[in-house]
Image (cartoon, rainbow, N blue to C red):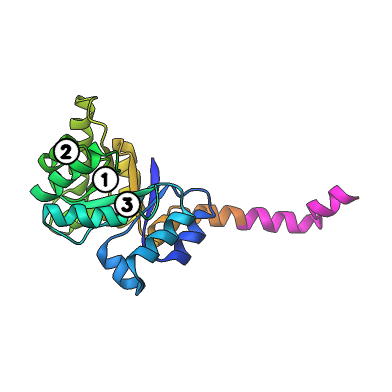
Amino acid sequence: MKFFVDTADIAEIRALAASGLLDGVTTNPTLIAKSGRRILDVIAEICSVVPGPVSAEVAATEYEQILREADVLRRIASNVTIKVPLTPDGLRACRRLADQGVMVNVTLCFSAAQALLAAKAGATFISPFVGRLDDVGTDGMKLISDIVTIYRNYPALTTEVLVASVRHPIHVVEAAKLGAHVATLPPAVLRALYNHPLTDKGLAAFLADWAKTGQQIVELEQA
């Protein structure tokens, strides 16, 4: 499974990219607004840090304007992925962009039928929002299972399932078990994947035992 981080905070992105575990970045208008910066500057800087796909979302909702905004965004860097809404105009734009070799992330997916349409439109990624479905009493992971199953039934469909609106590590593990290709995570959730109390407890015990020996590995090598 590939890990994307869902943020426009360049400091967070740099720190996570340094781990070597980051495969891409997703942004949206809300995240860009929180940065307080021009979208073109933010996306350009992210693309200079992360070589993988960087989703930049259009603000337009009508076909022609979506394409105009996409043209501006795609010229920022070769790894920009144009993010479009799952609407008739968004899917029409997706088809046009995909035919031009542009990566497209179709966002705000809440049903398997929508995901099938996005794949037919040539989307590089489909972004089902599991957390938002959970919020309204629907099983978000059931949607991931349905989409993965449908896509596997048709090898000609190459769209990757990008699990979005991830709220906790369990979402990540369940999505991976189902075979989703990508999870995009808030920085705090990505960092939470490291955590387990038994890891902390075990490390503390090992370090305490080692301290009792009075040895230093570097000093031993130099002796």
The type of residue carrying mark 3 is Arg
Dot 2, crowdedness within 10 Å: few (<14), some or many (≥20)?
many
Q: Is residue 113 visible?
A: yes
Residue drawn at x 28%, y 36% as measured from the top left: 178
Dot 3, crowdedness within 10 Å: few (<14), some or many (≥20)?
some
Read off the residue under disc 3: 74
Read off the residue under disc 2: 121
What secondary structure is the magenta-colored segment mainly? Answer: helix
Read off the residue under disc 1: 104
Q: How far apart are marks 1 and 2 (CA)?
A: 10 Å
In front of the other: 8 or 222: 8
- Residue 201's image quarter? bottom right
Instruction: Specify whether 39 is left or right of 199.
Output: left
User: Given contact means CB atoms under 8 Å apart, are the residues at marks 2 and 3 in contact?
Assistant: no
Q: Distance between the residues labelled 3 and 1?
A: 10 Å
The type of residue carrying mark 2 is Ala
Which residues lie in the magenta part? Answer: 204-222
Residue drawn at x 27%, y 53% as measured from the top left: 71
Q: Disc 3 or 1, which lies upstream in sequence?
A: 3
Mark 1, secondary structure of its residue = strand
Q: Disc 2 or 3, which lies upstream in sequence?
A: 3
In the displayed structure, would residue 134 be above or below residue 114? below
Residue 134 spot, x, y in % from top left: 18, 55
User: Per the image, is 214 magenta?
Assistant: yes
Residue 155 spot, x, y in % from top left: 24, 24
Q: In which quarter of the image is the N terminus?
A: top left
Residue lying farthest bottom?
36
Dot 1, crowdedness within 10 Å: few (<14), some or many (≥20)?
many
Mark 3, secondary structure of its residue = helix
